[in-house]
């Protein structure tokens, strides 16, 4: 029996209910989940993923969260991450401070203007190797707290084309990180990366969040770092369009536009 990392959320949840195991497509076996680590940014996708993870491990399980301060303009998301972690009563929630990311070519860390119009190709908000770094640290923490899974809210359907959100990347990282794991080398038991939102549309992600009673007013998507969401950056546009499609009011504050 297997859970396919980066499979659709329905398939992942069905497999969890059926088996309670985290056997990887790579052949890396893991025991029944008792502890899990979730990457929690404070955005919509990470919030829904955290709620899914909480449900997967059950009342007796331990959910740990990790968040990252990497010099992003939109640090307000970290306040949302802290709130969500509190609501879910995570066992621990370290904030990793990552220095030097401002040297990378990304408008998200101060290298250029954050776009407010549609652009061709991958937008300047992509931070090179961000998810590689985040997953390596989350994996290290999972091994430290003896967790069996790492949950990440990447999505490759309604997204900005970031290379490190693709299923091929997630699968390759899972193999590589287990090969660098003391636990895996000594016991043959690895840690599984679970990406339950991988193939879901943004509409379906928010529907799932509503089902799980996620408070989206306590999430943050805007890249620009203001007190109010700008409504114009790539992340705001995707968010607003999704709520519009669902006919639901987005209950965060937006700047007034002429």
Image (cartoon, rainbow, N blue to C red):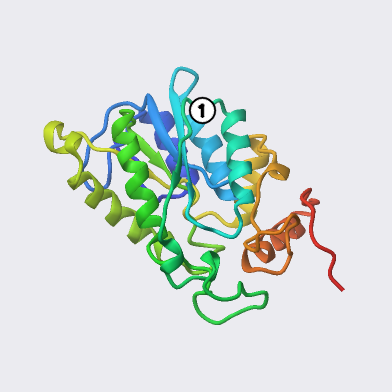
Circle 1 sits in a helix, a strand or a loop, which is it? loop
Residue 214 rendering spot, x and y as whole percentages: 66, 38
Along the line of sight, the residue nearer the viewer: 141 or 75:
75
Q: Is residue 27 left or right of residue 64?
A: left
Tell me where residue 243 sits by quadrant: bottom right
**Quarter of the image with the C terminus in it:** bottom right
On the question of residue 4 being in view, the answer is: no
Q: Residue at coordinates 31% horizontally, 54% vertically from top-left? A: 171
Residue, far right: 258
Along the line of sight, the residue nearer the viewer: 28 or 250:
250
**Quarter of the image with the N terminus in it:** top left
Along the line of sight, the residue nearer the viewer: 84 or 99:
99
Residue 138 rendering spot, x and y as whole percentages: 37, 43
Q: Residue at coordinates 55% horizontally, 82% vertically from top-left? A: 120
Where 92 falls versus 117 (above or below)? Answer: above
Where 34 falls versus 205 (above or below)? Answer: above
Q: Is residue 53 left or right of residue 203?
A: left
Q: Residue at coordinates 51% horizontally, 30% vertically from top-left? A: 54
Residue, far bottom: 120
Residue 90 rendering spot, x and y as whole percentages: 51, 28
Tell me where residue 151 sits by quadrant: top left
Local crowd at mark 1 within 10 Å, few (<14), some, or many (≥20)?
many
Residue 60 rendering spot, x and y as whole percentages: 45, 17
On the question of residue 106 being in view, the answer is: yes
Along the line of sight, the residue nearer the viewer: 124 or 26:
124
- Which residue has dot 1 on it? 90
């Amino acid at each position: 029996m297997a859970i396919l990392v980066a499979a659709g959320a329905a398939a992942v949840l069905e497999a969890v209910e059926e088996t309670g195991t985290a056997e990887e497509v790579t052949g890396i076996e893991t025991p029944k989940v008792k502890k899990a680590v979730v990457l929690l940014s404070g955005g919509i996708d990470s919030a829904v993923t955290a709620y899914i993870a909480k449900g997967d491990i059950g009342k007796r399980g331990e959910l740990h969260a990790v968040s990252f301060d990497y010099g992003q303009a939109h640090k307000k998301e970290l306040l949302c991450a802290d709130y969500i972690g509190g609501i879910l009563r995570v066992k621990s929630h370290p904030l990793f401070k990552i220095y030097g990311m401002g040297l990378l070519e990304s408008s998200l860390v101060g290298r250029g203007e954050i776009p407010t119009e549609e652009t061709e190709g991958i937008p300047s908000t992509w931070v090179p190797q961000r998810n590689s770094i985040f997953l390596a640290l989350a994996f290290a923490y999972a091994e430290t707290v003896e967790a069996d899974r790492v949950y990440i809210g990447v999505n490759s359907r309604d997204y900005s084309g970031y290379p490190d959100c693709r299923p091929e990347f997630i699968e390759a990282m899972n193999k590589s990180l287990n090969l660098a794991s003391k636990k895996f080398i000594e016991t043959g038991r690895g840690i599984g990366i679970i990406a339950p939102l991988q193939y879901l549309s943004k509409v379906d992600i928010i529907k799932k969040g509503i089902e799980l009673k996620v408070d989206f007013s306590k999430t943050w998507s805007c890249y620009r770092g203001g007190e109010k969401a700008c409504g114009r950056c790539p992340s705001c546009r995707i968010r607003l369009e999704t709520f519009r499609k669902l006919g639901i009011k987005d209950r965060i504050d937006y700047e007034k536009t002429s």
